[in-house]
Image: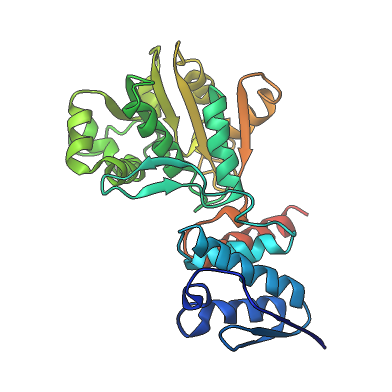
Amino acid sequence: MNELKFSPQSISEPSLAFGSMDANLKAVEKDCNVDIINRGDEITIRGEEVDRAMSIINEFFAVIDQGQSLDEQKINYIISLSKDGVSYTKSNVAADVLCFTHRGKPIKAKTLGQKDYAEAIKKHDVTFGIGPAGTGKTYLAVAMAINALKAKEVEKLILARPAVEAGERLGFLPGDLQEKVDPYLRPLYDALYDMLGRDAALRLKEKEVIEVVPLAYMRGRTLDNSFIILDEAQNATKEQMKMFLTRMGFGSKMIITGDITQVDLPSGKASGLTDAMHVLKGVEGIAFCRLRDTDVVRHPLVRKIVNAYDRVAERENG
């Protein structure tokens, strides 16, 4: 059995790094198959991966020293990165503030995948964010768009989503156009309300500075000086994807988000997102960012659910 003793070099209160009832240390014990004895100024680690366990604990202290907090998602991500010998703090994952919510909370990347995604959006006119549920594809896209709008880099924000369940016709639903499509666009509204507050978002919507529309209603438009987001793009057909991408005007940015494992199109209809990944590969000015299960920032069970479905899909596909 390996044994290692060390004293963390930190200005922080140890309890902030160790967690309530040493919960953070218990997570390290489980993942590294070690026993950790905490004597305040000295920590003893016995078991298999003692060096990795020590590096994780030092990462916890480094995060606290940088003024960040340790939540369950961050703890799990630090542990996950350690398996590849990658340091969360040295990677500067949360270095840049992407936007502030209406309550003043800074929005930052939480994973390396999210950081690369945000940087791609800054550098490219068209960015595809592709990955499983819970990786922040839509939320970060809206945050970047709101930031560009506040900085007057664009004049308009347009959020679009395919209304697949209603066959893009929507006519049989009660109410006017907005009432018909609102149920399909609710995730986009939720992100807007979080960034701007409900009242401010609705005022900008009334002034048509912000538009939230079904994909089918974008045909025939040319969008200059706009930040345009297509959400759930895996449910756009090839024809709709081409139509959407060719709406782009001067001074505009586009972000296309989707999960190619969750296509809801009728049988026989190919996904426009999958097609675009093939057709547009290597086109200058377009970036493709692949987010993975390690970038999931929702409840830890979401990552496990994603992995479980992926394993079944792999078996079914041979």
Give the vertical position of 1 relative to 125 (above or below). Answer: below
Q: How many circles with numbers are drawn on the protein?
A: 0
Say whether residue 295 is visible: yes
- The residue depicted at 45 percent of the width and 32 percent of the height is 230
Of residues 254 and 312, the one nearer the viewer is 254
Instruction: Pinpoint residue 285: horizontal percent, then vertical percent.
Output: 61, 20
- Hey, which quadrant is residue 42 in on the image? bottom right
Report the colour scheme.
rainbow
Q: Is residue 269 visible?
A: no
Image quadrant for the C terminus?
bottom right
Residue drawn at x 17%, y 40% as measured from the top left: 199
Name the residue rendered at 61%, 24% in the picture: 286
> Looking at the image, which is closer to me, 105 or 17?
17
Query: Left or right: 138 with respect to 100?
Result: right
Q: Residue furthest right?
A: 1
Q: Position of residue 123 (x, y in %)?
A: 56, 26
Looking at the picture, how far across and down is residue 151, in whole percent? 35, 26
Q: Is residue 114 above or below residue 61?
A: above
Q: Quadrant of the N terminus?
A: bottom right
| Residue 68 percent location from the top left of the image | 46, 59
